[in-house]
Amino acid sequence: MEHSEKPVIYKIINLTNAKFYVGSTITWRTRVRTHRRKLAAGTHHCLPLQNAWNKYGAASFVFRIVAEVDDPAELHSVEQVFLNEHHGTNQCYNMARYTDNSSRGVVRSDRHKERISEALKQHYEENIHPRLGLPHSEESKALMRANRSGKAVSEDTKAKLREANLGKRATAETRAKLSAMRKGKERGSEHAAKYNKAIVEVTSGQVFQSLKEVKAVFGLSPGMLAKALAADRPLIRGKNAGKHFRYADPNRLD
């Protein structure tokens, strides 16, 4: 096996068809051993390379240094040049397009997504999430707000969120927090008009003159009623399952 004390760009080459995987490392021998161990165990992160290794066998692959890099800080930049040239071609096994983020630009199959989801679910059934119970710092909250700012939520995502939350009731703690947030806030004329707008329960034809009246009769929380009105379809959970609430058409009211 080739040897170098410098940071290197390397290829794992399939001798049967000349296809290859491109990588970089500052510890060449250690990286080769890691690749071989994971490929032999069937746990390598690059599925195309793993599948080829399983099909052709270890004897069909060689590890070759293709460039030495004097400055370790430039290693990823040089590797990116190779990826820019070869990624997406029939000869390149690499799934990741960029060296700064191995997931950026990767298009995963539905089956691959399912495997990731199943693995995470199993992991957190057996292990406590490291963030469980830990509040975000104000700095983290500010960064998350800035990241979401200006991003429009698609109609498909809105529909999925409505479906996931329809019929769910907030905990007493959450309701108390929401109530505290709303206290002291002035309600505009637009809000008052909406709050006092007539609502019809479609399955029975019963008409109510305000949101407050509907909540009192059916025991619905403001959030649940708002979601039901936005979804405009029958509730699917809870004691009011099957009830369908909709803002009444004023032209049809007596």
Image (cartoon, grey):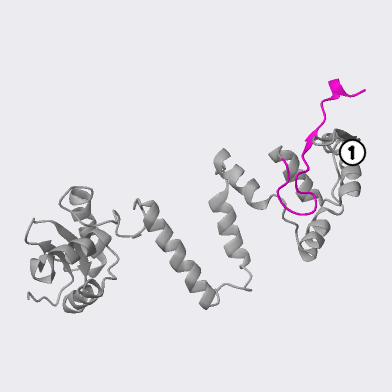
Q: Nearer the viewer, residue 29 or 69?
A: 29
Q: Is residue 197 visible?
A: no
Q: Residue furthest top?
A: 251
The part of the image, by quadrant, that contains residue 51 is: bottom left
The part of the image, by quadrant, that contains residue 99 is: bottom left
Q: Which residues are magenta?
A: 234-254
Q: Nearer the viewer, residue 209 or 80?
A: 209
Q: Which residue is denoted by mark 1 in the rendering? A: 210
For image coordinates 59% across by 54% down, the residue present is 145
- Residue 40: x percent and y percent? 21, 74
- Residue 95: x percent and y percent? 28, 56
Q: Is residue 57 visible?
A: yes
Task: Give the main secondary structure, helix, strand or loop, of the magenta stretch.
Answer: loop
For image coordinates 64% across by 74% down, the residue present is 133
The N terminus appears in which quarter of the rendering? bottom left
Amino acid bearing label 1: Ser
**Figure check: 74 above or below 189:** below
Q: Nearer the viewer, residue 199 or 134?
A: 199
The C terminus appears in which quarter of the rendering? top right
Instruction: Give the class, few, some or many, for how many residues have Cα within 10 Å of label 1's Cα (few <14, many ≥20).
Output: some
Seen in the image, is 191 located left or right of residue 57?
A: right
Seen in the image, is 102 located left or right of residue 23?
A: right
Q: Is residue 246 magenta?
A: yes
The part of the image, by quadrant, that contains residue 199 is: top right
For image coordinates 85% across by 39% down, the residue present is 195
Q: Is residue 135 magenta?
A: no
Q: Total number of numbered labels?
A: 1
Query: What secondary structure is marked by label 1?
Result: loop
Seen in the image, is 63 located left or right of residue 27?
A: left
- Residue 241: x percent and y percent? 76, 48
